[in-house]
Image (tube, helix red, strand yellow):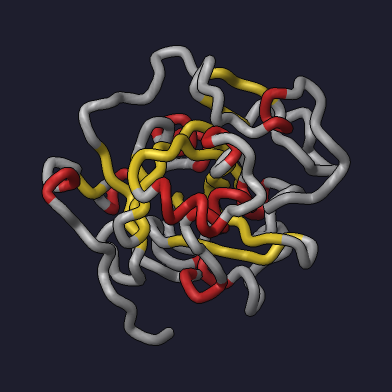
Amino acid sequence: MTERAAPRVDAAMAAWVPLPRSFFLGDARQVAPLLLNKLLVRDGVVGRIVEVEAYRGAEDPASHAYRGPTRRNGTMFGPPGYLYVYFSYGVHWCANAVCGPEGTGHAVLLRALAPVMGVEEMWARRPGARRERDLCSGPGKLCQALHLTREEDGADLVTGDGGVLLAADDRSPPGRPGVGPRVGISVAADHPWRWWVPGDENVSRGGRSPAPRRRMDA
């Protein structure tokens, strides 16, 4: 993996605190709701996480890690706190935060963000969006808006090495997040392993639906 620049930081971001490695050590089901309202930072373009899904490695047939390590999913089996990026059905990229002890293959899919900074850059990358809430309201959309591709697979979300960082500000996760089944999978679809910020307009359209669609995602 080639060396990449750390994310750009300006005065408005000085008070943000990068998440420590220990934050990501728990089970994906524990880490996922705690990621709500955290900040995903990509070279000055920032979104607040408002929807996530947990995937649990070998214990989860909907996970890419279910059948063990491959060239594609290798990052999932590495240390926690790294970014796993994959191409979904030849259509778009999806970004995940690796969690759990090294070797377990746990990860949290980042499903939706609320734009915070760099909105003009998001519009430039998502010219088909009609409203600001459409910029990052889905896993593929947020990767387009923040320009996350396979090049960012393996980026360190703790140190920012790789140009992507996860940080906290003064906003805590919701005390009672929305909870429901994961979206777009064809197996283990009944597990309530999706969480979102209630009432946030940036939650994905599929995430707002009570019924999962028939498609394998992460």
The vertical placement of 217 against 8, above or below, is above
Relative depth, front residue between 117 and 40: 117
**Residue at point 73%, 32% (across, down):** 206
Circle count:
0
Quarter of image, res 171: top left
**Residue at point 18%, 46% (across, down):** 13
Lateral position of residue 34 relative to residue 71, left or right: left
Quarter of image, res 66: bottom right
Quarter of image, res 49: top left
- x then y, percent, for residue 27: 48, 41
The vertical placement of 82 against 18, above or below, is below
The N terminus lies in quadrant: bottom left
Relative depth, front residue between 136 and 187: 136
- x then y, percent, for residue 38: 35, 37
- x then y, percent, for residue 45: 36, 53
Lateral position of residue 10 relative to residue 197, left or right: left
Note whether residue 98 is visible.
Answer: no
